[in-house]
Image: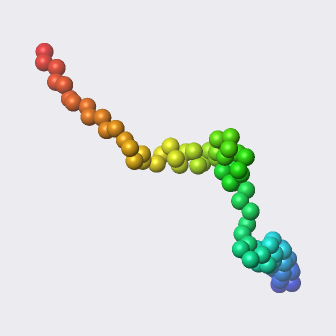
Amino acid sequence: MIETIIITMLIVAICLALLAIKIIFKKNGRFPNTHVSGNKAMRKRGIGCVQSQDREARAPKRIKVEERIKDKKVKK
């Protein structure tokens, strides 16, 4: 049982090390940006990620026209 756990942890550690080779050995190594908005061709066409578009739509606008509704009382 303990041998299986040690072997599993060793395999996971080796996999993580292999995934991080580019990041460790490159000067400013980073994971590649695979997000839709990280693609130059997509940005040029105006295509964005749904999550980014939703976040932009929900953000409060700096220039905003506030409407004021006056209560009109109707007399009968």
Name the residue furthest front: 44
- The residue furthest top is 76
Vertical side of 50 occupied by 2: above or below: below
Residue positioned most to the left: 75
Please provide percent x and percent y for residue 27: 74, 77
Q: Quadrant of residue 31?
A: bottom right
33 or 14, nearer to the observer:
33
**Looking at the picture, how far across and down is residue 33, in whole percent?**
71, 59
Vertically, is 1 above or below 65? below
Asked whether, in this view, residue 6 is left or right of residue 36, the answer is right
Residue 15 horizontal side relative to residue 57, left or right: right
Position of residue 46 measured from the top left corner of the image (x, y, whole percent): 64, 41
Q: Quadrant of the C terminus?
A: top left
Please report the residue visible at 48 percent of the width from the left and 46 percent of the height from the top: 58
Q: Name the residue rendered at 52%, 47% in the picture.
A: 56
Residue 40, above or below 17: above
- Residue 63 occupies which quadrant of the picture? top left
Q: Kindly tell me whether residue 45 is visible in this rendering.
A: yes
Image coords of residue 39 (percent x, y): 71, 51
> Residue at point 81% right, 75% down?
21
Q: Quadrant of the N terminus?
A: bottom right
Residue in front for this viewpoint, 67 or 5? 67
Q: Residue at x 77, y 75 (%)?
A: 26
